[in-house]
Image (cartoon, rainbow, N blue to C red):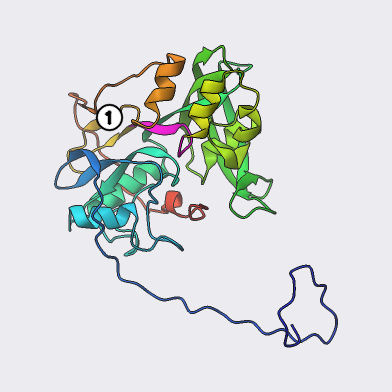
Amino acid sequence: MNGRVLKPSYETKVGDVIDIDVPIVVETELLPYDFPLQIPYEDEDLLVVDKPAGLVVHPACGHLQDTLVNALLHHTKDLSLGFNEKRPGLVHRIDKGTSGLLVIAKNDEAQRLLALQFQRKTTHRIYRAMAFGQFKNEQGTIRSFLKRHPEDRKRVASSPDGKLAITHYTVRSYHPSGVSLVELKLETGRTHQIRVHLSELGHPIVGDVTYGASKRLKNLKSVQLRKMIEEMPRFALHAMELGFLHPRTGKRMLFQAPWPSDLMPLVEHFGFPKYHDKYEVHIDPGPPQKVTDGPVENDEMSDDEDLE
């Protein structure tokens, strides 16, 4: 400003001269990333991967070559480029800090037919989370409109001019220490949707410091439990079930994942259900079904990038 670097609080005046240096965006070629992946299922059309917490799904600022996409390129060369050459194979995604199941398309037709199912909300997606507090209702639906937080660009918040977000929840268990096990079914797939919805309901996810978990942690009486949660490198949210019609066979498929190892100490401490000891793949023996054709809007991938 006027030849000097000033503080952001400076108030501009008529006649001020502002110089702006626009950074040059460097296009980089996607490179394979040697990262161990848990792949409970794979065939010629698709694969299902259990993404660990901490791994970004696709390249973005700060994560150009160390993402799930890069790791998939190390695993296989057969990934669809139908929607975006920088996001090969992707049909949907989950946040960096969330773990769980994702389906990846290995050819354009598989990607198109899978994307149609996500677009039409005919897929089956179940998340399980450990959240603070005892819920007033055992079941409910959280409905709001989400967009980037007006003051903190790394967060999301409800706003009348945001995108519609719908989350259905069922409380499966409660521990007297003040933590509930919640099952969540997504009707939409917005960035940070479950985290924002539970936080705004008054039940932030254990370990999710971005959305208010730190304040609730202080209320826990057990020093051992507080220490266990403080040392966790992630928050307690896991995408445990994923179901869809196979794009080639038309068979209904359901995939179920166990709790990740970094959440098991909490699960055992609270005595919550473990659900699955290993990955399970279920294929419906009934007659195949066809995905009705139509235009792909790919709404799942139109949301803001992962804000972390």
Q: Quadrant of residue 295?
A: bottom left
Query: Which one is nearer the viewer's eye here, 293 or 33?
Result: 33
| Residue, disc 1 | 254
Residue 3 picture location, percent across and down: 72, 88
Residue 105 picture location, percent across and down: 25, 50
Query: Which one is nearer the viewer's eye here, 200 or 122?
Result: 200
Secondary structure state at the residue bearing disc 1: strand
Residue at 31% of width from left, 48% of height from top? 293
Q: Residue furthest top?
A: 176
Residue 138 lies within the magenta run: no
Residue 240 lies within the magenta run: yes
Query: In screen coordinates, is 144 left or right of 82?
Result: right
Which amino acid type is shown beneath numbered disc 1?
Leu
Residue 69 picture location, percent across and down: 31, 55
Q: Quadrant of the N terminus?
A: bottom right
Q: Is residue 108 visible?
A: no
207 versus 79 height, above or below: above
Q: Is residue 269 visible?
A: yes
Residue 192 picture location, percent across and down: 52, 43
| Crowd around label 1: few <14 · some 14–19 · many ≥20 (10 Å) | some
Identify the magenta region.
232-241
Q: Quadrant of residue 292?
A: top left
